[in-house]
Amino acid sequence: AAVKKYQFDVQMKNVSRLCNAKPIVTVNGMFPGPTVYAREGDRVIINVTNHVQYNLSIHWHGLKQYRNGWADGPAYITQCPMQTGQSYVYDFNVTGQRGTLWWHAHILWLRATVYGAIVILPQPGKPYPFPQPYQETNIVLGEWWNRDVETAVNQANQLGAPPPMSDAHTINGKPGPLFPCSEKHTFVVEVEAGKTYLLRIVNAALNDELFFGIAGHDMTVVEIDAVYTKPFTTKFILIGPGQTTNVLVKTDRSPNRYFMAAGPFMDAPVSVDNKTATAILQYKGVPNTVIPILPKLPSSNDTSFALDYNGKLRSLNTPNFPALVPLKVDRRLFYTIGLGINACPTCVNGTNLAASINNITFIMPKIALLKAHYFNLPGVFRTDFPDRPPKAFNYTGVPLTANLGTSTGTRLSRVKFNTTIELVLQDTNLLTVESHPFHLHGYNFFVVGTGVGNFDPKKDPAKFNLIDPPERNTVGVPTGGWAAIRFRADNPGVWFMHCHLEVHTMWGLKMAFVVENGNTPELSVLPPPKDYPSC
Ligand code: C2O
């Protein structure tokens, strides 16, 4: 195992896109930021220095950070943010994981421009469990705002209104030639005919699930969220914010220029999709003057494609890469995802957009929860987060009135070390027409079942896949439906769980688990590093 060191200088950089120039927050002046490379088993040391006027922290999305939440990154959950001029060293081991993950700022909306890929290669001598690709390319999907995102979001917050939609989607930071002034802001990957390429696709968009496809080419899905899958072939993938997908592509078509395209699933308003990002797959020797062929992505409300696609995802589950699904459940949780309008006397129009889990809107603490937990600081959080909503109702009924009232609090759920948890996430769709990509820090989990409508505790568990369910760190809870996940709570610490649509996180669609220590120092949270930022 090696030690990989990185210096991340967080600094402003003038960037022009869509005929517009503005300063954005970047790492090392790059947009997207640098890729972190490591091998399974390596130690990674990243010194982050904050040179901007914003408070900041960085999250290594999907890395389990065993006993080491100090390096996880979500502001006020595992650490206080770095203030201007401060540095913090994220020091962690990459154990038992290989594949594509990513990193991003984890405070307010800074991740709009502060993100990049993490590539964890298998240990030397351990090949991929699929044909060795000739070359690999990262495809990091994002969004671009012509406005200053922070200001716009703050204004929206004060008015109790939704924040502004982005102006374009991007592929590796570039919207592609379908947008004005964007000819030169187009990502191009040059390929040789007759080879196999591995695309490492990351959805770093703030608020949109995305379809991705390549004109004329099929893709073979081989990995999601850094876990190998049973390969299957598809024309398009669906990828939620927070998720990653590796695909193999054979360059077996006539030499030409082909568009790769990323466009939204269930964007609002669904009828207007003027934000499709494109990049170019260019066969060697084909002149740049050839107009590329455009793929026709599924329409933005194609729910049946989404259901069908997600249904094909299966863990590889071979002796080398077993799916260790917990078969016995120690504790069952049922969380409703509430999204609606709350009475808010202080708001301009008397209402406020609020989001809740089991009718609780999460309030961010002033002191990092992991610190409060480790040092036993009283009064920072409570551990009485309810295992189920206050009362059962028709979660997906229309009109929905039962779930409007929420209470607020910094309430966590306390979990015994090494117990097995089954969590059913039940959407109570009210306002929006999108699925919720739920992300759990510190863990992977198995998605043992999903469905539309209300979860039925009598009938649905019989249909769970306990053999080869997809293992991931972010699951799309279907609109007006549910997702059931299982995991073993073997990583002590405080772990955030939230919707990875940034607008929903902002409205309170988040909570955290406190996983207790095991009964030896080796099964307990490590001590904090010396330079751990204080508030
Ligand atoms: Cu990728 Cu808590 O986030």
Image (cartoon, helix red, strand yellow):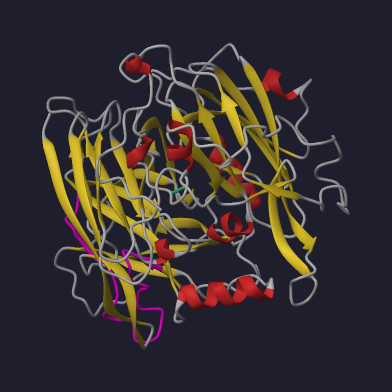
Q: Is 264 one of the magenta-colored residues?
A: no
Residues rendered magenta in the picture: 170-195
Q: Is residue 168 above or below residue 416?
A: below
Q: Position of residue 299 (x, y in %)?
A: 59, 62
Query: Residue, x 62% and y 70% (percent of image)?
Result: 157
Of the 4 image quadrants, the one containing the N terminus is: top left
Which secondary structure is most common in the magenta stretch?
loop
Q: Quadrant of residue 106?
A: bottom left
Q: Is residue 285 above or below residue 394?
A: below
State the residue in front, 3 or 378.
378
State the residue in front, 199 or 165.
165
Query: Residue, x 60% and y 64% (percent of image)?
Result: 267
Query: Can see residue 313?
Result: yes
Whether residue 291 sits left or right of residue 210 in the image: it is left
Q: Is 193 one of the magenta-colored residues?
A: yes
State the residue in front, 462 or 216.
462
Query: Residue, x 46% and y 81% (percent of image)?
Result: 147
Q: Position of residue 500 (x, y in %)?
A: 52, 51
Q: Is residue 6 above or below residue 152?
A: above
Query: Residue, x 65% and y 67% (percent of image)?
Result: 270
Q: Residue furthest front?
A: 378
Query: Can see residue 256?
Result: no
